[in-house]
Image (cartoon, rainbow, N blue to C red):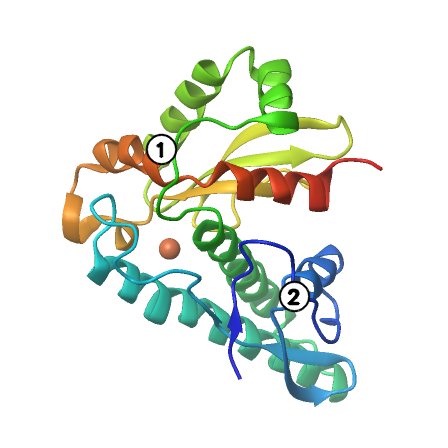
């Protein structure tokens, strides 16, 4: 059974993921949780299917890049997270925590990789681009001054990530504001509690086949495939206080 990334409303999901806290709500809502159960406290994840054809993002991102990115890299993080969850469960079952430092590092890396790739593939698409509208537009204007200023900050953050990482538009729940963050790898430089709602993957695997070392060109073109209505749905679904 495979789950399709929801570009509309969440499909609804099964089970909670032990020890992942707030992520359990995310995964449940995103229908990432699978039917493959290790024990009553852990449900493993399955790679969601792309919600569009592999060539749907051309010419911004080529078909081969999308295929490898989704089927190999995203799949690798899903497999890695499942392995981490099983290893941690085994540690608890055997009351043996000698490896918890490394397991915790692995969990942060793979869980963050899954979340960011999930958001990445589900908030880009064909016939997209332009500017946000509605509540998201209002909040971007409030928190960044204008959309153009936001985009300058976001694109600059994405272009200047050191080595592999992400540009991130996130909702910060304590101050109730939108923030632009950088992430190195998947998990470094995060701000606790923030929920990403739109992300630009600047690992080379996201663009190198077409753009080689021209990351800035990729980021500029990335603006053409952002599905802003989907980003706004994420904002309203996870972030705006009721
Ligand atoms: Fe990636």
Q: Is residue 211 left or right of residue 133?
A: left
Q: Residue at x 66, y 27 (%)?
A: 135
In primary-sequence order, the first of circles 2 and 1 is 2
Q: Which residue is mark 1?
A: 223
- How many numbered marks have been drawn onto this rendered protein structure? 2
Ligand 1 visible in quadrant: bottom left
Label 2 Cα crowd, 10 Å radius (few <14 / some 14-19 / many 20+)? some
Mark 1 crowd level (few <14, some 14–19, many ≥20, 10 Å Cα): some
The location of residue 136, given as percent across then percent down, is: 61, 28
Q: Say which of 77 and 28 sits in front.
A: 28
Q: Give the percent coordinates (x, y) of residue 195.
A: 64, 43
Quadrant in which the C terminus appears: top right
**Side of 149 relative to 9 (left or right):** left
Under circle 2, the secondary element is: loop
Whether residue 195 is visible = no
Residue 102 location, x and y as percent?
A: 56, 67
Residue 242 against residue 21 in the figure, above or below: above
Question: In the orientation shown, which residue stands out farthest toward the right?
Answer: 242
Tell me the tag on residue 11: 2
- 228 is higher (above) or lower (below) than 87: above
The circle drawn on residue 102 is none
Please tell me which residue is depicted at 22% across the width and 59% down the height of the picture: 63
């Amino acid at each position: 059974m495979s789950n399709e990334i929801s570009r509309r409303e969440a499909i609804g999901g099964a089970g909670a993921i032990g020890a992942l806290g707030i992520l359990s709500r995310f995964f449940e809502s995103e229908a990432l949780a699978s039917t493959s159960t290790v024990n009553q406290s852990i449900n493993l994840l399955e790679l969601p299917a792309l919600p569009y054809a592999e060539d749907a993002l051309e010419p911004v991102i080529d078909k081969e890049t999308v295929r490898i990115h989704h089927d190999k890299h995203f799949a690798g993080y899903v497999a890695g997270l499942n392995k981490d969850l099983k290893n941690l469960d085994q540690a608890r079952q055997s009351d043996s925590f000698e490896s918890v430092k490394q397991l915790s590092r692995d969990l942060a890396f793979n869980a963050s990789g899954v979340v960011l790739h999930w958001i990445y593939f589900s908030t880009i698409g064909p016939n997209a681009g332009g500017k946000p509208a509605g509540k998201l537009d209002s909040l971007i204007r409030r928190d960044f001054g204008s959309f153009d200023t936001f985009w300058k900050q976001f694109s600059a953050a994405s272009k200047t990530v050191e080595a592999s990482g992400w540009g991130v538009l996130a909702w910060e729940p304590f101050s109730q504001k939108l923030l632009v963050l950088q992430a190195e790898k998947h998990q470094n430089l995060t701000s606790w509690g923030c929920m990403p709602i739109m992300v630009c993957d600047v690992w080379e695997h996201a663009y190198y086949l077409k753009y080689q070392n021209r990351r800035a060109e990729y980021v500029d073109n990335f603006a053409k495939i952002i599905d802003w209505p989907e980003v706004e749905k994420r904002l309203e679904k996870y972030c705006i206080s009721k």
